[in-house]
Image (cartoon, rainbow, N blue to C red):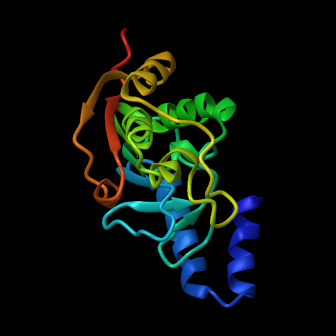
Amino acid sequence: MKPLLTFLRMILTGHPKRASRQLRSLYYMRTPGVPLRLHVGCGSRRLPNVINIDCNSSPATDYVADAGQLPCRENSVERIENYHVIEHIPYPAVGGVLAEWFRVLIPRGTLVIECPDLDQATRDYLDGNEERLYSIYGRQRFAGDAHHWGYTAARLKTLLESVGFTDVEAQPPQDHHKENEPCLRIESRKPIPRP
């Protein structure tokens, strides 16, 4: 029912192209055999060749949904990427969101998480860089722009493994945020089920 209400809201507020993308994306996410790649928490940044998902409608968004309630079938997504999203999710809800991403990924599917590096941001702040307070708490320019929790590579590895992810590895950050603040990138996989 919620996808239909979102679609109608887009039509009634004068966004027929967004409404069309919403329906087309829902179709792809629910159709068997269609390989999916998701950019969850896209905000205003649209990535090519993926379904861009955010909880808010914007010109970049293909589908409006909560990060923890994806309309995808189980084992249907090849790759999920999210950039500076996890720190905006209240910590008590993070395990459920990771479990949802695990549910929709195919075996050997990849999850990419980039977020502020709490350890380095804290060191920088203690060395006198006041700008790092934004890395720790968020800029708080609008609702949802605050950081609920801070992450380190070790903390993310523990969280991901607790949900069932394997091959958890730190990689060099690739998102534009790395130009302005210390960031980390963690890639992990959903394992192949044992017979």
Q: How many marks?
A: 0
- Most extreme residue toward the left is 172
Question: Taking 58 as reference, is 14 above or below it?
Answer: below
Q: Which residue is found at the position 46% from the left and 62% from the top?
A: 52
Q: Give the percent coordinates (x, y) of residue 103.
A: 51, 32
| Camera-side residue of 155 and 23 | 155
Q: In the image, 13: left or right of 177?
A: right
- Most extreme residue toward the bottom is 14
**In which quarter of the view is residue 193 placed?**
top left
Location of the N terminus (image quadrant)? bottom right
Q: Which residue is found at the position 57% from the left and 70% from the top?
A: 22
| Camera-side residue of 152 and 1 | 152
| Camera-side residue of 119 and 20 | 119
Q: Give the percent coordinates (x, y) of residue 30.
A: 53, 52
| Camera-side residue of 57 and 185 | 185
Q: In the image, 27: left or right of 168?
A: right
> Is residue 34 visible in this depiction of the protein?
no
Q: In the image, 139: left or right of 38?
A: right
Q: Give the percent coordinates (x, y) of residue 106.
A: 38, 34
Q: Give the percent coordinates (x, y) of residue 118.
A: 44, 36
Q: In the image, 161: left or right of 70?
A: left
Question: Taking 175 as reference, is 21 above or below it?
Answer: below
- Most extreme residue toward the top is 195
**In which quarter of the view is residue 141 placed?**
bottom right
> Is residue 71 visible in this depiction of the protein?
yes
Q: Which residue is found at the position 56% from the left and 75% from the top?
A: 58
Location of the C terminus (image quadrant)? top left
Q: Which residue is found at the position 33% from the left and 35% from the top?
A: 186
